[in-house]
Image (spheres, rainbow, N blue to C red):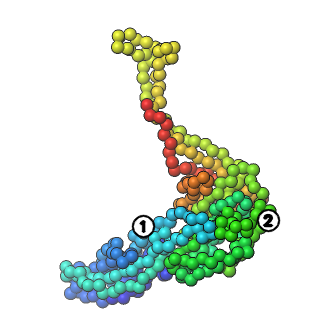
Amino acid sequence: MILNSAPATYASVNGDLVYVAYDANAIDVTKLNYKYVGELFIGGVKVFTSKVFPRPDNARGIFNFGAIIREYVAAKLSPASGIKAQELGQGSFCIDVVLKLREEYNGAISAVVLTDSTRTFTNQYDSVLLLNKPQSNRPLVINLFFTNNKYYLPYFATTTTPFNVVIAGNTKIVTPAVANSIQLLNISPGAINNDYPGSITSASTSYTVLLGGVTYTVNLICEPIYTNSTLHFLNKFGGFESMCFSKVSRESKELERKEWQQPEYRVNSAGIMTLEENGILHEQSSTFAVKSKKKLSISTDLLSDAEYTWLAELVASPLVYLDGLFVTPVKITNSNYEVKKYINDKLTNLMLDIEFGTVTKSQFR
């Protein structure tokens, strides 16, 4: 048995992952009810078995394991303090998969006839991973505030070889624990001063971040008049990065009430009908439960064309977190996104509506 084709290394778990197998037994008329049997192994454990008949036109067995494999990859933000904030590896950014093939015919399943090599699939979409490079489409100039403590930039490391992050004049050596991992780097002033105290002060105007041959310039701008809302989001490469929303924000609450209707009178134990008690009219339409959901409208500063293009990834992201006293999962409720251009719209800002997942319930009656 041979594999005519298999998914490429670093193919996306968010697309089709197709294996095509061929064996001459598939066209042997003495091999009744012939099927290709594909067994999928993750972490040395068989997680799925699929049986397919040969295609009538070419006798190939075609397996698409995309929907199965992506169930074993789930990113989650849980950063630590300092410049190296988090490492996303097996199960959170990538997954190693082995396919073993058997045959079934004449009512019996054979021993394994082919074991494929280990293949690594990753959690990007609509993009090609940049090997040993920052995994971001963001512009190379970043505006931050001195008070920022969390601001993430992802880097894809294909090996466990240490690499350097030259940040604000300091060389941070980062050693990946596993190969094929996303290294989540915190490039905020707070993280830099955590690892290198006093490197950045309130009098600093800018610093650079050199990572994988790419240089980012971070401009420290005046502290915002409004509350700064920093969003961390899973980008199209499968890593987390950040954006500040430092202009006007407005909080609102969506309420849902449950009610029941009663007569305007009450009849007490003595059979007396009353319309009031102690000067207070009896309730007719009574509320017995109220649920409230918090919402927030936030705005960025004025954006460039490149920032508008990049932030489409934020609006499309399935994982977004709002930074504050706690890092809170939120949901962007905007259903449309317009990539604005200076030539058409001049300088404009981006306004987003976000919704918190928690629901508060008032007193029950």
The x, y position of residue 295, in whole percent, is 58, 46
Which quadrant of the figure contains the C terminus? top left
Q: Relative to residue 106, is residue 267 drawn left or right?
A: right
Residue appearing at x 63%, y 74% in the figure: 134
Residue name at image x 27 percent, y 88 percent? 25
> Are the residues flagged by discs 1 and 2 in contact, CB closer than 8 Å?
no
Residue 149 position within the rendered picture, expressed as x and y whole percent measured from the top left: 66, 61
Q: Alpha carbon of mark 1 to alpha carbon of mark 2: how far?
A: 45 Å
Query: In the rendering, at what x and y percent does residue 111 appear?
Result: 26, 84
Closer to the camera in the image, 205 or 26: 205
Tell which circle, 1 or 2, labels the residue nearer the N-terminal end: 1
Q: Which mark is residue 239?
A: none
Q: Which residue lies under the disc numbered 1?
A: 71
| Residue 206 in view | yes
Q: Residue at x 63, y 69 (%)?
A: 83
Q: Residue at x 56, y 45 (%)?
A: 294
- Please state the horizontal and vertical placement of residue 68, each as a whole percent of the image: 39, 70
The residue tagged 2 is: 205
Q: Tell me the crowding category of disc 2: few under 14, some 14 to 19, or many 20 or more residues within 10 angstroms, Cα based.
A: some
Give the image quarter of residue 166. bottom right
**Above or below, 225 relative to 165:** above
The reply to whether residue 127 is in sight is no
**Residue 29 in which image quadrant:** bottom left
- The one nearer the camera, 323 or 304, is 323
